[in-house]
């Protein structure tokens, strides 16, 4: 069983943000094999989803931070992932998010998780700013980035895929130093 000792746990009004666990793979795989994953490298076959899930865990090991799995506070069911991300070759540190569970879409849960993750990255990792890499046709993620105060900065190509770099407000620009959702 996967256990990333020392990984922080964040709490928001409706969510727990925690390290990825082996038991999260099924929800992750169910998302990644569908067309809903088209903006984040999917759909892929289950073996490729396994490898991608390993990247989530490996990022924590290699960088000391990474995507949190956000889970429903009441049921504990994994709903998606959000967090700081900067694999080798990335243009700069990113705040990313993905909603795995269709029933969690459109309810502000990704927003809640991404705000908490950004606040943690600003407060605990000392990031002064962050980007989000969003596919040009991903209107939902663009709306979430806008809601977080991010603005489109420039077009980019990451790993052979075109996207838009969205710039988040700096920690100093946020009235509470970036701690708006950090619990």
Image (spheres, rainbow, N blue to C red):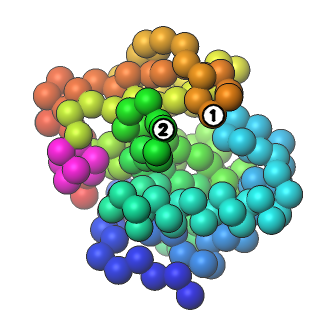
Farthest-out residue, front: 89
Is 102 displayed left or right of 11 in the figure? right
Farthest-out residue, bottom: 1
Q: Is residue 170 within the magenta segment?
A: no
Q: Earlier in the sequence, mark 2 or mark 1?
A: 2
Q: Which residue is mark 1?
A: 159
Where, by quadrant of the figure, is residue 55 drawn? Answer: bottom right
Mark 1, other Cα within 10 Å: few <14 / some 14–19 / many ≥20 = few
Tags 2 and 1 touching, CB below 8 Å: yes
Give above or below for 9 relative to 49: below
Where, by quadrant of the figure, is residue 30 drawn? Answer: bottom right
Q: Which quadrant, please, contains the C terminus?
A: bottom left
Residue 124 pos. (x, y %): 20, 53
Q: Which residue is mark 2?
A: 89
**Residue at image location 83% in from the left, 42% down from the top:** 35
Magenta range is 120-126
Residue 86 pos. (x, y %): 42, 44
**Residue at image location 18% in from the left, 45% down from the top:** 126
Residue 140 visible in the snapshot: no
At mark 2, the secondary structure is: loop
Residue 29 visible in the snapshot: yes
**Residue at image location 70% in from the left, 20% down from the top:** 137
Give above or below for 126 relative to 144: below
CA distance separating discs 2 and 1? 9 Å
Residue 64 pos. (x, y %): 33, 62
């Amino acid at each position: 069983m996967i256990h990333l000792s020392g990984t922080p746990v964040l709490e928001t009004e409706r969510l727990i943000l925690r390290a990825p666990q082996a038991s999260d793979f099924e929800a992750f795989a169910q998302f990644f094999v569908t067309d809903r994953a088209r903006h984040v490298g999917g759909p892929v076959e289950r073996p490729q989803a396994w490898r991608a899930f390993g990247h989530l865990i490996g990022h924590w090991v290699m960088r000391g931070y990474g995507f949190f799995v956000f889970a429903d506070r009441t049921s504990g069911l994994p709903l998606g992932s959000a967090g700081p991300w900067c694999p080798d070759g990335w243009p700069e540190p990113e705040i990313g998010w993905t909603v795995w569970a269709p029933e969690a879409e459109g309810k502000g849960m990704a927003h809640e998780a991404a705000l908490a993750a950004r606040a943690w990255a600003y407060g605990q990792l000392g990031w002064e700013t962050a980007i989000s890499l969003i596919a040009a046709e991903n209107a939902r993620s663009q709306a979430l980035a806008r809601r977080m105060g991010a603005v489109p900065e420039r077009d980019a190509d990451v790993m052979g895929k075109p996207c838009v770099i969205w710039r988040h407000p700096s920690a100093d620009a946020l009235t509470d130093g970036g701690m708006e959702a950090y619990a």
